[in-house]
Amino acid sequence: MTKLYVSKGSFPEKYFDDTVQYIAQTQEADGAIPWFTGGPLDPWDHVESAMGLAIGRRLDEAKQAYYWLKDNQLPNGSWFAAYKGGQVEDGTRAETNFVAYAATGVWHYYLITGDKKFLSNMWPTIAAAMEFVVRLQGPQGEIYWCEDTTLGIREDSLITGCSSIYKSFECALNIATIVREEVPHWAMARTRLGNAIANHPECFDRTWDSKSRFAMDWFYPVLTNVIRGKEAQRHLARRWKEFVIQDLGCVCVNDEPWVTVAESCELVMALLSAGQYQQAVQLFSWLHQFRDNTGAYWTGYVYRDNQLWPEEKPTWTAGAVLLAADALSNRTGASHLFRNETSEAEIEIGWEGTTD
């Protein structure tokens, strides 16, 4: 098994050059980053891939990815669920966590570059996106998962999606401070959302089967800083054996023998957020057996059948690998973002990001 140990100050640049290049070569001329050449694009995974480009210092390409969002934003501030080849592939709905994630990506780019002009250029896009999200907030603070183009707002919520939105609110508030815009209702929405995730489980999975079998529902509240400190460590420990397979990684769901690379990378960052650095280093070291000779990473591995599945190497998986490597190594000015530590930029604007 190929192991790679990444730790503070030891980002293996040459090793990951091909991973960055894989994303860059898949990017289309208009800035869109599909899952793979000729494949679909969804806004969340597009942003994940763009963050990977920025970590790899492909800043022009990353900027073009964010400008794709600007160019394709709908009048209501959202994006459709999926695009392909320059066309809308799934125009049935706009998903709130997809829409909000633009703020996370734009703030991530700013932390790496310090480019205030870019931040100002993207502000109208981010403002419109977050206003769309706020409009879909429910009475207990939960954010409804989507607005259907036919049926309207679908009044149910996802723990994983809402946790991601909670982080995006943090990033959007930081952007607003830099561009000197007042958006106190976003701060209130974030506080209410955090309270819903932490204290109102009845708000989630009301109209479909529980998503608790999914690993992301387990660790995303830690990854996004809803659950913090010692409680975060206890939270991860409670279900560790359900989801983590020694020497392989994190399964997608607890009742299937399928380890997935992207979820494993996100769990690495959740461990860092909880202060469990050695566990994070160890978990990340297992994942490079799923890398191919182009620098791309397979989606996942069915260990019962000893089979890579599906036979896809998504750009967003490569992006997640680069985010985890950056968080472990402190390579860029954004490396702290998913460790949920306060950067110099955030100290400068007076944002601590850890209190509600």
Image (tube, helix red, strand yellow):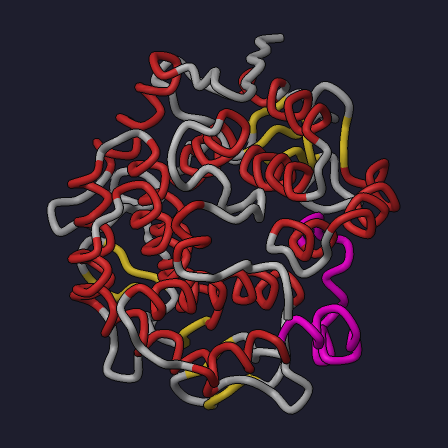
- Using the image, determine if residue 207 lies above or below residue 265: below
Residue at (70, 80) in percent of width and height: 207
In the rendered image, which quarter contains the N terminus? top right
- Using the image, determine if residue 161 lies above or below residue 310: below
- Using the image, determine if residue 19 lies above or below residue 224: above
Q: Residue 255 in the image: x percent, y percent?
A: 79, 45
Residue at (38, 84) in percent of width and height: 149
106 or 84, nearer to the observer: 106
Residue at (30, 46) in percent of width and height: 34
Residue at (40, 55) in percent of width and height: 348
In the rendered image, which quarter contains the C terminus? bottom right
- Using the image, determine if residue 32 lies above or below residue 198: above
Q: Quick check: is 201 in the magenta stretch?
A: yes
Q: Residue 147 in the image: x percent, y percent?
A: 45, 82
Figure quadrant of residue 261:
top right
Q: How many marks?
A: 0
Figure quadrant of residue 217:
bottom right
Left or right? Give the position of 180 relative to 236: left
Left or right? Give the position of 178 relative to 341: left
324 or 161, nearer to the observer: 324
Left or right? Give the position of 197 relative to 17: right
Q: Residue 327 in the image: x percent, y percent?
A: 51, 34
Q: Residue 251 in the image: x percent, y percent?
A: 70, 38
183 or 89, nearer to the observer: 183
Q: Quick check: is 194 in the magenta stretch?
A: yes
> From which residue to which does the magenta span run?
193-216
Q: Residue furthest top?
A: 1
Figure quadrant of residue 304:
top right
